[in-house]
Amino acid sequence: MAQKILVVDDERLIVDSVKYGLQKEGYAIVVAYDGEQALAKAREEKPDLVLLDVQLPKKDGWAVCRAIREESRAPIIMLTARGEEADKVLGLELGADDYLVKPFSLRELLARVRAALRRSTEYAEAAPQPVTIGEVELDPKSHRVTCRGKLLELTRKEYDLLKVLMTNAGRVIERNNLIDRVWETNWVGDTRTLDVHIRWLREKIERKPSQPRYIQTVRGVGYRFATPSEVE
């Protein structure tokens, strides 16, 4: 069965162009032209991936992204005419997996779509045992993370990043390696995005984020997650 993609944009020429290009690659396409329609389609069609414009009538892309993420782990790629870092960070914080700044090429769009779907499939198929280190427990089967008995609300990227760190506890993972494994090797965004996500994770799992016990910085190299014996 073809993977289903929901394309959301109020500019019909963009929708038609993207739809045509994706259908040629074998994807099944569902379209929406405003935020309310997008949420209805997402709930009805349960797409494998969502291409979501930021500036939408009736309900903006940020609100749609937040609502979809509360109900689904399908990858979300934001489409925006704005290139400001604040907009990119906001989208990632709300649960988006990637973003594309208009105008973009069909070739780049397809690369981002394939990468997002591949990551989603890999994580769905992988089912290793839960990892518990100190007060933090990560369950790959359910994609749930708890800390001190409390269920954490993590974006997909926060979860992916934490999973890489916790399953490699004690090992120093270089910055570029982390970016390749979480954002894929074709990532062309700002590498500071990694630091932003590390900060968000620390705020959620560390008792004192400014003095982290779990997620440790190895200056000039990357990051490591503490071993169970280090946080006993």
Image (tube, rainbow, N blue to C red):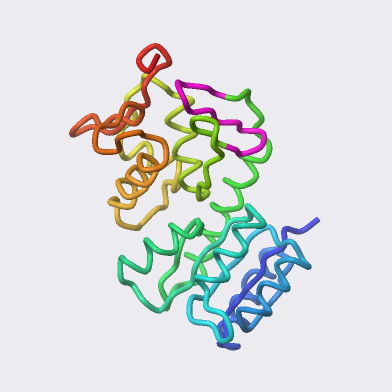
161 relative to 64 in the view: left or right: left
- Residue 118: where, in percent of width, then height? 60, 47
Outermost residue toward the right in this view: 1
Of residue 198 and residue 20, the one placed in the foreground of this image is 198
Q: In the rendered view, does 187 fall on the left or right side of 27?
A: left
Identity of the residue drawn at 48% across and 76% down: 54
Image quarter where the C terminus lies is top left
Range of magenta residues: 131-144
* Residue 154 x/y as whole percent: 50, 47
Q: Is residue 123 above or below residue 85?
A: above
Q: Quadrant of residue 91?
A: bottom left
Q: Is residue 13 magenta?
A: no
Displayed quadrant of residue 59: bottom right
Measuring 62% from the left and 63% from the top, which residue is drawn there? 68
Q: Residue at x 49, y 25 (%)?
A: 167
Q: Is residue 142 magenta?
A: yes
Q: Nearer the viewer, residue 46 or 189?
A: 46
Residue shown at 57%/86% (left/top)? 10
Q: Quadrant of residue 213?
A: top left
**Location of the N terminus (image quadrant):** bottom right
Give the vertical position of 186 relative to 86 (above or below).
above
Residue 220 is left or right of residue 166, and the answer is left
* Residue 166 picture location, percent across and down: 46, 27
- Number of labels in the image equals 0
Which sits in the foreground, 114 or 57? Answer: 57
Q: Position of residue 30 (x, y in %)?
A: 72, 73
Front one among 116 and 82:
82
**Residue 10 horizontal side relative to residue 100, left or right:** right
